[in-house]
Amino acid sequence: MTNPAPNRYPFSMPMGWFAVAESHEVEVGQSKAAYYFAQHLVLWRDEEGTAHVQDAFCPHLGAHLGHGGKVEGCEIACQFHGWKFDCDGVNTDIPYSDRTNRKAKIFTYPVVEANGFIYAWYHPHQEPPAWDVPIVEEIGGGEFVGPKRTSHVVQAAIQEMAENGVDSAHFRYVHDVNEVPVIHRYEADGHMAFMESTQKFPTPRGVVDGSICSTAHGPGVNIVRFGGIIDTLLVTATTPIDDQTTQCRFNFYVRSLGDAAVDSSVGDAFASEVDRQFEEDVPIWEHKAHLVRPALADNDGPFMKFRKWYSQFYADAISDERTVFPPPYWPDKMDETPAKATASARNRTID
């Protein structure tokens, strides 16, 4: 028996680079609201084209700059009283005063725009970035086309979802595949983790040997390269909305076969299959308990090695009060199963 407790997990949100938007979602001169890291944010792009991410509330009287803040040059003006702030959050103008307010400063997140995403650096104690955002060279090079996009919001922490990557055994039972991935290599090096595996993929022309190579750059950025049927690149952006809710974006690119219609069809098929499997995992993630000391079998994947690597991204101590952290009671989710998720996924449209 498990007892309900206020904390869903023994850890809070990890530090790292996280996507807060796709680049095309924030136009020049636009401001918009967002909510990540359990914080209200304003995203805006100045008139020189640079993206910025700041805490949302004007320090004057608390207006949310994502709901009407006006971009003027390389500054954002509050829609409430016209106070202006620069890209560092410094108050630069109060239109009805001869002086600015040096204490009125908005917290500004370090930002890097790459791989089609706007990434913000999150650290619970506002420490500076500890590593760089990777640049995916295949994007924009002409050989790969895309992206095909899917996005999901899941009531689970990033770590809980990321553990799937080292869990080959669940493929047979959750995803109903005969051939599960075989992990040949899992290594951690600083903020990066590498995994190489192989899997047999059924096709109309017979079974094809496939390869999967993934590189995680902290908890928020994962680059996966698939080989076998067709070279496919998956750029995964996983971002905490709060300490128990996560947004996961998948952007798929396929090596062009020289025919736009065929490229699109292949991309759709690959994205749909990954999307189906993700949807099947969601009921597991949302309803499972987090076990601090899981009872593992001999041939289970490198769970504890993964957890040891992942633990470095928590700035605050991991709770040792309990060993079992159950999920909340969600009355409207009581009938969810992977099988029902499969049916839902088949009706999804890939962008």
Image (cartoon, grey):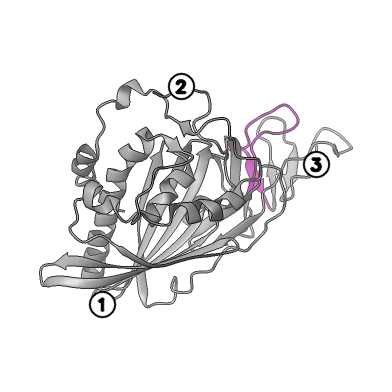
Label 2 to label 3: alpha-carbon separation: 51 Å
* Up-down relation of residue 172 to residue 33 (above or below): below
Disc 1 is placed on an element classified as: loop
**Is residue 27 visible to the viewer in this orientation of the structure?**
no
Secondary structure mostly taken by the magenta-highlighted segment of the chain: loop
The 10 Å Cα crowd at callout 1, few under 14, some 14 to 19, many 20 or more, is some
Sequence order check, earlier mark of 3 and 1: 3
Q: Which mark is residue 257?
A: 1
Disc 3 is placed on an element classified as: strand
The 10 Å Cα crowd at callout 3, few under 14, some 14 to 19, many 20 or more, is some
Query: Could you say where residue 48 lies in the image, as x and y percent from the top left?
Result: 64, 60
Mark 3 vs mark 1, foreground winner is: 1
Query: Could you say where residue 239 lies in the image, as x and y percent from the top left?
Result: 50, 47
Sequence order check, earlier mark of 1 and 2: 2
Residue at image mark 2: 4
For the N terminus, the quadrant is: top left
Disc 2 is placed on an element classified as: loop
Residue closest to the far front: 298
Q: Which mark is residue 93?
A: 3
When asked about the image quadrant of residue 132, the answer is bottom right
In the drawing, does residue 242 fall left or right of residue 1?
right
Residue 185 falls inside the magenta stretch: no
The kind of residue on which mark 2 rests is: Pro
**Is residue 341 visible to the viewer in this orientation of the structure?**
yes
Whether pointer 1 and pointer 2 mark residues with C-beta atoms closer than 8 Å, the reply is no
Residue closest to the far right: 98
In the drawing, does residue 82 fall left or right of residue 28?
right
Query: Could you say where residue 116 lies in the image, as x and y percent from the top left?
Result: 48, 61
Residue at x 29%, y 62% (from the top left corner): 181
